[in-house]
Image (spheres, grey):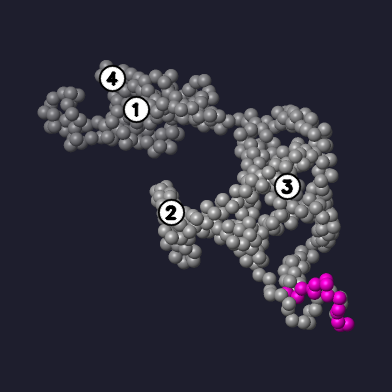
Amino acid sequence: MDEFTVDAFVNRDDPIPVISFDAAEDLSDEVDDVSDVDRKRDRFRRRGKDVKENIKKVQQRASETGSSIQDRLLEKLLQQVIPIEDLSASRAEASPAQDFTTRPSFSLPTMSANFRRFNARIGVVFVFQAKVIRLLSWNTPTHTLSFLAIYTFICLDPYLLTVLPFAVILLALLIPAFIARHPAPPPTITTFSSHTAPFGYNAAGPPLAPAPTVKPVKELSKDFFRNMRDLQNCMEDFSRVHDKVISLLTPPTNFSNEPLSSTLFLFAFSTALVMFIASHLLPWRIIFLSIGWIITASSHPTIQRQLITTHKTHVAPREKEAKSYLDAWIAKDIILDSAPETREVEIFELQRLSSAGEWESWLFTSSPYDPLSETRIRSERPKGTRFFEDVQPPHGWEWSEKKWALDLWSREWVEERIITGVEVETEGERWVYDIRYEYDDADLGLMYGGGDSEHLATPTKAKKKMLPSWEDGSDAENEGRGRRGEWRRRRWVRMVKRKWQARRSVSDGSRI
């Protein structure tokens, strides 16, 4: 078994350090960490052979039996939890015009095979990451200064960005491939032709080496395990960056602290307005040039130590003081005590005419219980509460006024609901009465045989004459109370305001 894979991208350097957000950690601790890294590396090497042999045995056993019993049992268990239907397949059935790629469902053998293939080819990413870290950490100052020179030219002349991809193809792909295809002669050769430079490249001659290719690393090789090491570190980096971003952005922006979020909204809105008007006036080339130089210079070890010392001695002691100034400004200038949302609610006081000819209080209900209402037609009793004090505000609201107010414009709410067969009082207590139907005496005599009609059922075939409607309420009022029905109602109103936190309410008939 080969320890290394030829022509494969893999990070064969030291492990890429995991990102840390502890700015107060001193760089001098790195010297103490070297011994820990060496011990872990030795432990990893000692266990490497055992791990390789175990994995090799598992693979041989899996190749003989197809897959292990544990994998098959776990796959069956996961199939009960994870839906088997594929999302892409359902989308393709829903819209056949779109060409969706068929994706396999979840499977442990498929995931294992894909992970091995992915880990064998991910080395190029870690190589690039290691080179960027070495470049920004000033490992080779000439390389970092060359990068800053190129960055400066691009900032001062942004049109050079169109040249950058072709320069990368030439310098990073074609020229190294040509040098590998036409290598220089070994330094022991002392003879050379007069047409070629000593130890130079002979472009006119035949190629001396095969063309370089990029191959995935072999499984169970050192390069394969190095990729796994770097992959686990990248997952840790992503988790730390994700958690740090969430912890920094979520509390100020989710309005859990409304004054702070309102302040951030105010600054963001003001900045957006200013940038919308004056963004074309800013020297963006100089700004990006300065940002790039500052970030690259701050990565230098000497400057990093100075920045950490400055943060400890000057910035950290004044963080609480600056936060107190910000909190005082927010408490003074950010006003959130705006008037809450208000609404008008209504309740109808319903009274019924007793057998003695007197009106008695019946209940307070949310419906006027007019003659043509659905509840009245079904001969159902109105629902509500008997006392004014039992009327509760709607869920999530509270009273903003202490008392109920009588609606003096009865004609308006009757017209809005298109209520007919009622009489409206325009003065006094603003009652709205039902209008009772009258029947001719001759018809009553024929139907009841001259009996007392008050103790019999309501006639259905007698000739009836309806009293004037509410539009002629003045005439009906002059003709007396004898033509009014058994129900009357009037409307009360009261203002409510929305509560900050809605309380759980008990749903009963008294709630509006």
Distance (Cα) linking label 4 and label 1? 19 Å
Give the answer, above or below, for where 466 lies relative to 359: below
Q: Residue tagged by mark 1?
A: 383
Which amino acid, mark 3?
Answer: Leu
Give the answer, above or below, for where 25 lies relative to 58: above
Report the span colored magenta.
181-195
In primary-sequence order, the first of circles 4 and 2 is 2
Distance (Cα) linking label 4 and label 3? 71 Å
Distance (Cα) linking label 4 and label 2? 88 Å
User: Is 189 within the magenta?
Assistant: yes
Q: What's the mark number on residue 68?
A: 2
Front residue (pair 503, 101): 101
Distance (Cα) linking label 2 and label 3? 63 Å
Of circles 4 and 2, the one toward us is: 2
Q: Residue at x 30, y 25 (%)?
A: 486
Distance (Cα) linking label 1 and label 2? 69 Å
Residue 26 on image: x %, y %: 77, 38
Q: Is residue 484 visible?
A: no
Of circles 4 and 1, the one toward us is: 1
In primary-sequence order, the first of circles 4 and 3 is 3
Q: What's the mark number on residue 273?
A: 3
Q: Residue at x 52, y 20 (%)?
A: 402
Q: Residue tagged by mark 4?
A: 354
Quadrant in which the N terminus appears? bottom right
Of circles 2 and 3, the one toward us is: 2
Which amino acid, mark 4?
Answer: Ser
